Image (cartoon, helix red, strand yellow):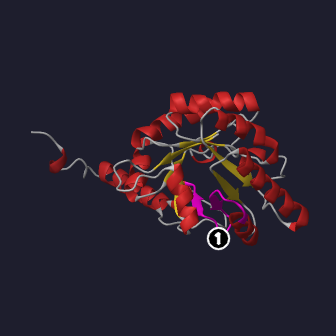
Amino acid sequence: MSTVTTASATREHRVTLRSLASRKRKGVPFTVLTAYDFTFARLFDEAGIDVLLVGDSLGNVVQGHDTTLPVTLDDVVYHTRLVARGVPRVVDDVVEVGPEDAVRSAIRLVKDGGAQAVKLEGGVDIAESIRRIVSAQVPVMGHVGLTPQSVHPMGGYRVQGRGDEGRARVIADALAVEAAGAFAVVLEGIPQDLGKEISERLEIPTIGIGAGVHCDAQVLVMHDLLGLNDATPTFVKQYASLGSETSKAARAYIDEVVNRKFPAEAHVYR
């Protein structure tokens, strides 16, 4: 389960579920970005990112796992608390998808973590979980196509929705998510023309990641955007190279300490 945070209340136009729906109707895309701690949540909010997602991607980029499967509800709650301190509006990933467990998890993420909404992976198969969570007054974001929590049944991180059968399956999942009451749906790892078709068929906003330019919003993992990963998927664009800059800064620090250039006079007390 992921959590989502929306833009700071200090902004002139506060981001709400209603305003996101309005953006779709007006054809104005919005932005979604993952965050896992206070500092980056604050920085992204100040930059104007519309929605922050505490995704189970933390299993890969924070915990160092090969998949998101080891991520626990306690992990997501912990990181949601950190993000919510920087931006008091968050969307979380739900990692238990049975209807009863999903409802309990969603309520805990809101009450203990400070999330404003939750995200569930799956379509037709988890529609009942979405309905129950929405009935419990917790907004839900769906997630169809390539769903990382189902990486093993899918045979790895593979593009979904190719061929007539695959295409029909992703469309059915997206429609089921909308019918169950989700306020938006992530479309991941599908052909661009399929992302366009689904975005045109649904009334709720679509959020693309590897789904093409026609979605109503785009989402990236912050480590990919900032160049903090060694390798990134084809659909990712790096907007900075902070990984190499971080290593460069650390090497400069080592050099100055070894050569007694740091601390200098400006860094000591008298």
* Mark 1 residue element: loop
Judged left or right of residue 230, residue 247 is: left
Judged left or right of residue 175, residue 260 is: left
What residue is rendered at 82% in x and 55% in y?
Answer: 172
Q: Quadrant of the C terminus?
A: top left
Image spot of residue 129 (x, y percent): 74, 37
Residue positioned most to the right: 165
Q: Quadrant of the N terminus?
A: top right
Task: Give the labeled residue for mark 1.
Answer: 214
The mark tally for this picture is 1
Q: Quadrant of residue 160?
A: bottom right
What residue is rendered at 71% in x and 51% in y?
Answer: 178
**Magenta range:** 201-221
Residue positioned most to the left: 270
Of residues 33 and 67, the one drawn nearer to the viewer in this rendering: 33
78 lies above or below 181: above
Image spot of residue 144 (x, y percent): 74, 53
Q: Residue 206 lies in magenta, yes or no?
A: yes
Classed neighbour count for the residue bearing mark 1: other residues with Cα under 10 Å, few (<14), some (14–19), many (≥20): many
Image spot of residue 61 (x, y percent): 58, 48
**Amino acid type at mark 1:** His
Q: Residue 2 lies in magenta, yes or no?
A: no
Q: Quadrant of residue 251?
A: bottom left
